[in-house]
């Protein structure tokens, strides 16, 4: 059976170059980079090299890059680290309604400690209006965190404009969650004008178990993990040298291949959109039709349930998701789809496709060919669809 992975937001397959960079540090060069003897030399050099590779991808200085254990940890470090460091200046934080749960749950935890959180709404495409951010700013606002691109519907936000507004009208820090966008569109921190950024190398062909955190020079945060001097004192604990070395190579490849990746993905994305919308009725594309990631597609298929679609497609060799990886096992409507006005009943029929370098136009054609049969079978078993058919006949 042909196997097609359309779930690259969950994880991507490591590139051979990434694995090659990691291998020496499992057995051969196993030293602790913080030691002062010879065994530390190669691990320390690998750490420094990876930091420079990540900095070049982000257009940052090497000492502005901190390695964490995941993109979610990077988000928590930005949110909680800022809150605890700046609580003497205020306790107001601004986020959007469509942030990843590693942001939303972090601010919920802070709300229990006395912080106040404002959630900015989005339009039907999932876009944040920069003026809504401006209107929400207060004298006690210490942080604004807006995702660079939605991990569910792919809509890209105008972070440059939002950041400009934040810095011109307040003393708040500006953070963006680029865990989904980094490696596929530009994440130039100087161009975006941000103070902090989070990224996840496993999303762009790097290893799991590592995250990137950009912290602009002069920006003050409190560490979440105390105990050592690692990562410039911002994240204690012995560094995961193999993963960091792999993450560095993934960053180097991303910088080199960014334009080629977009050129490869856009035709596949286009074929899927035109094929799905052209072959099925009562199916809708979520997110902005143009200002979206080149590797994201999110559809709502009416009258059926998303998990059933996933299982049937899986039986046909097609791996997809329904909602984000963090919510796909929770039987409730996606908060992102709710925020853009999708009815909760319809949101249950969401289909999330995330493309990668191993996908092709042939994969798109196979998916477009197989999906209608799956949808039609499930609709025939749907009591709701039967009611709709009866009404249409009347």
Image (cartoon, grey):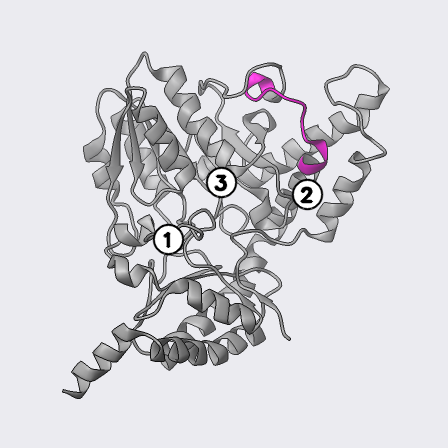
- The nearer-to-camera label among 3 and 1 is 1
- Determine the image quadrant of residue 162: top left
- The nearer-to-camera label among 1 and 2 is 1
- Give the quadrant of the C terminus: bottom left
Other residues around mark 3 within 10 Å, as few (<14) / some (14–19) / many (≥20): some
Query: Residue 242 colored magenta?
Result: yes
In the displayed structure image, the side of residue 391 where residue 324 appears, left or right:
right
User: Which of marks 2 and 1 precedes in the sequence?
Assistant: 2
Other residues around mark 2 within 10 Å, as few (<14) / some (14–19) / many (≥20): many
- Please give the label number shown on residue 188: 3
Q: Residue furthest left?
A: 394
Establish if 333 lies above or below 218: below
Residue 119 is situated, as x and y percent measured from the top left of the image, at 26, 37
The residue at the point 25 percent across, 48 percent down is 122
Residue that carries the numbered disc 2 in the rendered image: 249
User: Which of marks 3 and 2 precedes in the sequence?
Assistant: 3
In the displayed structure image, the side of residue 266 where residue 209 appears, left or right:
right
What segment is highlighted magenta in the picture? 232-243
């Amino acid at each position: 059976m042909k196997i097609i992975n359309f779930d690259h937001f969950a994880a991507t397959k490591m590139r051979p170059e990434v694995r090659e960079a990691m291998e020496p540090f499992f057995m051969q060069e196993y030293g602790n980079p913080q030691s002062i003897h010879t065994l530390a030399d190669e691990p320390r050099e690998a750490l420094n090299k990876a930091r420079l590779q990540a900095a070049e991808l982000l257009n940052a200085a090497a000492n502005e890059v901190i390695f964490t254990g995941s993109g979610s940890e990077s988000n928590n470090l930005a949110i909680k680290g800022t809150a605890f460091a700046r609580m003497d200046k205020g306790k107001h934080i601004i986020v959007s309604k469509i942030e990843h749960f590693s942001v939303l749950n972090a601010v919920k935890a802070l709300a229990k400690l006395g912080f106040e959180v404002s959630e900015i709404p989005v339009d039907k495409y999932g876009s944040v209006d920069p003026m809504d951010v401006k209107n929400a700013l207060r004298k006690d606002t210490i942080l604004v965190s807006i995702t660079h691109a939605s991990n569910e519907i792919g809509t890209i936000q105008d972070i440059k404009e939002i950041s400009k507004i934040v810095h011109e009208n307040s003393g708040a820090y500006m953070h963006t969650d680029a865990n989904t966008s980094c490696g596929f569109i530009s994440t130039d921190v100087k161009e975006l004008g941000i103070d902090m950024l989070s990224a996840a190398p496993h999303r762009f062909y790097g290893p799991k178990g590592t995250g990137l955190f950009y912290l602009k020079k002069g920006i003050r945060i409190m560490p979440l993990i105390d105990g050592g001097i690692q990562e410039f004192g911002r994240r204690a604990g012995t560094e995961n040298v193999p993963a960091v070395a792999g993450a560095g190579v993934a960053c180097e490849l991303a910088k080199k291949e960014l334009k080629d990746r977009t050129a490869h993905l856009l035709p596949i994305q286009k074929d899927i959109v035109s094929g799905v919308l052209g072959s099925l009725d009562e199916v809708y594309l979520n997110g902005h039709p143009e200002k979206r990631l080149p590797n994201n597609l999110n559809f709502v298929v009416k009258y059926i349930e998303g998990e059933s679609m996933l299982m049937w497609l899986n039986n046909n060799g097609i791996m997809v998701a329904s909602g984000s990886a963090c919510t796909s096992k929770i039987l409730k409507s996606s908060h992102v789809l709710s925020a853009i006005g999708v009815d909760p009943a319809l949101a249950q029929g969401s289909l999330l496709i995330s493309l990668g370098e191993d996908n092709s136009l042939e994969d798109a054609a196979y998916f477009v060919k197989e999906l209608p049969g799956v949808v039609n079978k499930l609709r025939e078993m749907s009591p709701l669809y039967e009611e709709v058919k009866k009404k249409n006949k009347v």
